Amino acid sequence: MDEILNQVKEKWIKENLLSDKVLETINANIMPIERFMAYYRCAIMEVETKFKVLNEQFSLQYDRNPIESIKTRVKSVEGIIKKITKKNIPLSLEAIEENITDIAGVRVICSFPEDIYYLADCLLQQDDITLIKKKDYIKNPKPSGYRSLHLIVEVPIFLENQKRPMKVEVQLRTIAMDFWASLEHKLQYKKDIPASEVEYLSKELEECASISASLDERMEKIRNRMNNFAKEVDETDNDYKKVFAALIRENSNKNGGIINNSQNLAQDYRNMLTYNKENYLLED
């Protein structure tokens, strides 16, 4: 009897739930969502490429890279649904695109706080980037101690037959800020922490954030001091080069003195090489 019921059930599923009409309906509803998410993936690629180009240019010009790493993510469907419920957003792709600005996310990890503002300025100066919103949690940290620079930008993606503007959330942090934020995020999801411990841990995290910010500041001062010293050395070398060039010009006008001496030195050097080569061959 059970076998007959299972056969009837399987037949009903195939005829009703797996029919061509049902599959077409599913595809008709899924495809717009997949296309919608693909647009955000394309927007991420556009922004990520811009930062990679800036990093490369900075490397060529200043012989160092301001970017340690770049992380990207597209918010999951589950995360989008939670935000729709929380913000009471109408259940349409147009409403989601208009009201949720962090579906596409790019996180840029920098070496120093100065690099964060430099990269942000360079990005916002590009004529195809539009700033929608800016929140500076570095100058104005959250009560928890969280520090980061948040930008909501609009960037165009170029499809086969259209140009489509897309919103991307950009977070810029130092290594220390990212380390702190990662740990704080993990602790937030520890549901089994007793209430008595929550206040203590919150204070500890806030203190760690202050230590982290102090470390960023000290490391940046060390970097700046090293750069200033290197600049002084370069300026001294340039001064010596200028003095030497002046001496050459001055002596070259006195009967070709420097030129003749240089020629003699060159000839002596060639004679020495010839002598060493001959003696080396004799020793073999």
Image (spheres, grey):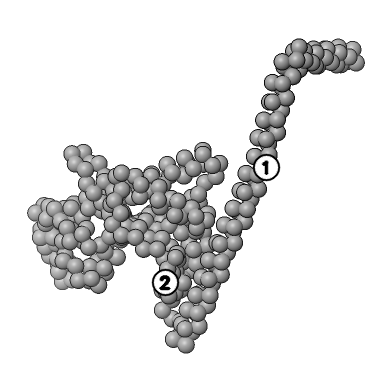
- In the image, what residue occupies the spot 46% across and 59% down? 173
- In the image, what residue occupies the spot 31% across and 60% down? 133
Q: Position of residue 100 (x, y in %)?
A: 25, 62
Q: For this rendering, which residue is in front, 8 or 30?
A: 30
**Circle 1 or circle 2, nearest the eye:** 1
Q: Quadrant of residue 148?
A: bottom left
- Does the rendering let one see residue 23? no
Is residue 145 shown above or below 260? below
Quadrant position of the N terminus in the picture: bottom left
Asked whether, in this view, residue 229 is left or right of residue 180, the answer is right
- In the image, what residue occupies the spot 26% across and 69% down? 82
Q: For this rendering, which residue is in front, 79 or 221?
A: 221
Reading the image, the residue beneath label 1 is 233
Q: Which mark is residue 141?
A: none
Q: Position of residue 48 (x, y in %)?
A: 38, 48
For marks 1 and 2 on the same chain, the one whose residue lies earlier in the sequence: 2
Quadrant position of the C terminus in the picture: top right
The three-letter amino acid code for the residue at tag 2 is Lys
Reading the image, the residue beneath label 2 is 142
Number of other residues with Cα within 10 Å of mark 2, as a class: few under 14, some 14 to 19, many 20 or more = few
Is residue 3 shown above or below 224? below
